[in-house]
Image: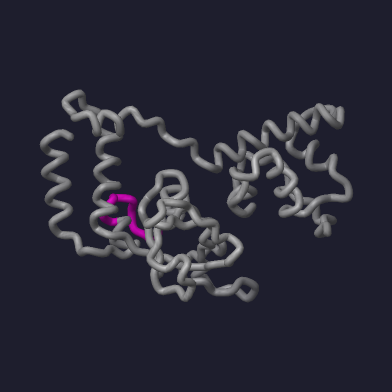
Amino acid sequence: MEPYDYLELKSRNSVLELTLSLSEVFDYLGLGALNSYEIKLVERVNNDNMPIRIMGVDEEIVQGRLIASLELHTEKNVLFSKTTTHTRNNIYKVLTVIDDTKNIIIDVSANNILITNEQMYATRDEITEYYRNDLLRDNPSEDRNKQITKVKSKRKKEPIQDKRFRLFETFCKKVAKKKNLPDDKHKTVYDSYQPPMTRKDFYDVIAEIDKGSFRAGCEDFFRDKRIEFKISTAARNRK
């Protein structure tokens, strides 16, 4: 780490409390104001292992533990609407957490654990180490020790949404070939399933190609503007 980076990090660390709220985490990492950029949270936790812990919940299985993955359950709605329920903060569903003692990931997606940013926190040591690693990736230097060089050469993980979209493209090609469709466009593939499938049912079919990558819910997946079809209004749940 360059000298100015070390001094900056040391100075920033000295003013931190032992635990940080999510707003303080965003401010410390320079991610912008939480109320404006909270949507970054899912990608930072799921793809970049940002160390965020859970507090203030009744479920003992997740209380105080690091979040390994989560998904946006309900996006906040602060404007008055006759049709949409007022939601002050984004609501997230916790999918997996980390058991610190055994260093294993626990799947809690079936527990339906919903939390807001007010039930998340970070410890000073964990978040400063995360920030330090960010500096190493952003400021490459040949004057580092072996441990830092290892961080420098670490391959960045593919964002989960990009991976799911890539797998979806592969899925469309396979279906088009198997069903002898005129092309492998998203709409052509979706329309080939009759009667029309709901969003969740079609997502479950796609997930068969790689269940691990599609373990998260379908809302974020279908929000991707690269997906070029709309769910039919005639679609009904399949049993």
Q: Where is residue 120? Give x, y as percent.
A: 39, 65
Q: Where is residue 185? Give x, y as percent.
A: 75, 33
Quick one: which residue is furthest to the top in this view?
142
Q: Which residues are magenta?
A: 27-36
Residue 175 lies in the magenta-colored region: no
Quarter of the image for the N terminus: give it. top left
Q: Where is residue 206? Give x, y as percent.
A: 71, 43
Quarter of the image for the C terminus: give it. bottom right
x 43%, y 55%: residue:
98
Q: Where is residue 233? Give x, y as percent.
A: 80, 56
Q: Main secondary structure of the magenta part?
A: helix
Seen from the viewer's position, the closer of residues 171 and 229 is: 171
Is 220 drawn above or below residue 154 in the view shown? below
x 24%, y 58%: residue:
124
Task: Left or right? Give the position of 16 relative to 64.
Answer: left
x 30%, y 33%: residue:
151
Task: Left or right? Give the position of 13 relative to 45.
Answer: left
Is 116 drawn above or below residue 1 in the view shown? below
Identify the image quadrant of residue 2: top left
Chosen colour scheme:
one colour
Quick one: which residue is furthest to the front in this view?
102
x 34%, y 63%: residue:
121
Residue 32 lies in the magenta-colored region: yes
